[in-house]
Amino acid sequence: MRKIIKDKAIVDDHWNVLKLTEGESPETVSVPAGQQIVPLQVWLTQKTTLSARKDIGVWLASDERPEQLKEDITALPLIAVDFPAFSDGRGYSIAFNLRSRLAYEGEIRAVGDVLRDQLFYMQRVGFNAFATREDRSIEDALKGLTDFSDVYQTSWDQKTPLYRRASRPAAQDLP
C-alpha cells in the first residue's frame, strides 16, 4: 500500500487518484466505489451524484481556481492540489486560498512532483498531507517538515511575524 505523510506522520494512503484516460470525458467517466480523488471537472459535471457520497475528494490542477469549490467546501473531506513540476508554485496559492479565504478545514494534500525541499513551505500555506514522489524516501521527506525551528514571515500557520513575537529590551534599557 502506498504511504503518504499526513499530519506529520507516515500513514497508509487509502485514497485513489482518478485520472481520465484517452477517450474519457468528465461527463462519462465512471467513478468507482471506495475513496476516490476526482478531477475538478469530474466533480463539477457529476456533482449531483458524487455529492451524496462521503468518500469523494477533489483534485485541482495548478491552473484551476479553488473558488470553483466554494459552495461544496464543507462536503469534501479531502482536496488535493497537483504539482505538475517541482518549479510550479501555483499550488501554494491554491492551498493558502483554501485555508484563508474559503475557510477549508479538511485535508489539503500535495500530489505530483512533491519533494522534501518543498514540504516545510507547503505546510506553512495550509497543506497537511503530502504524497511525495515514489522514487524518493518518504522517511527523508518527513524530516523536511522540521527543517527550520522558527519563521520570520506570517502565513497560514503563523499569523504574527517574528519581530512581534520576540521579546526585546526597551530602548531605555539598552546600553
Image (cartoon, grey):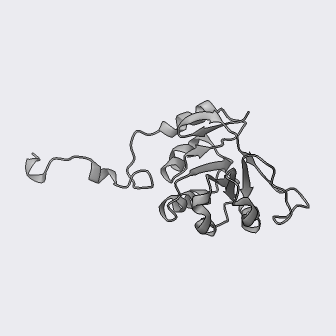
Q: What residue appears at the point 73 percent right and 59 percent down from the top-left corner?
A: 50
The picture places residue 4, in percent across and down from the top left corner, at 64, 38
Instruction: Decide if residue 6 is on the left or right side of residue 136.
Output: left
Please name whichever residue, 157 or 29, is drawn nearer the observer in this view of the structure. Answer: 29
Please name whichever residue, 136 or 105, is drawn nearer the observer in this view of the structure. Answer: 105
Please name whichever residue, 143 or 75, is drawn nearer the observer in this view of the structure. Answer: 75
Say which quadrant the N terminus sits in.
top right
Is residue 50 visible in this depiction of the protein?
Answer: yes
The picture places residue 75, in percent across and down from the top left corner, at 61, 58
Instruction: Decide if residue 65 is on the left or right side of residue 104.
Output: right
Residue lying farthest to the right in this orientation: 23
Please name whichever residue, 125 or 44, is drawn nearer the observer in this view of the structure. Answer: 44
Q: What residue appears at the point 52 percent right and 54 percent down from the top-left corner?
A: 105
Total marks shown come to 0
The picture places residue 174, in percent across and down from the top left corner, at 11, 47
The picture places residue 53, in percent across and down from the top left corner, at 70, 55
Q: What residue appears at the point 62 percent right and 34 percent down from the top-left corner?
A: 11
Q: What residue appears at the point 67 percent right and 65 percent down from the top-left corner?
A: 63
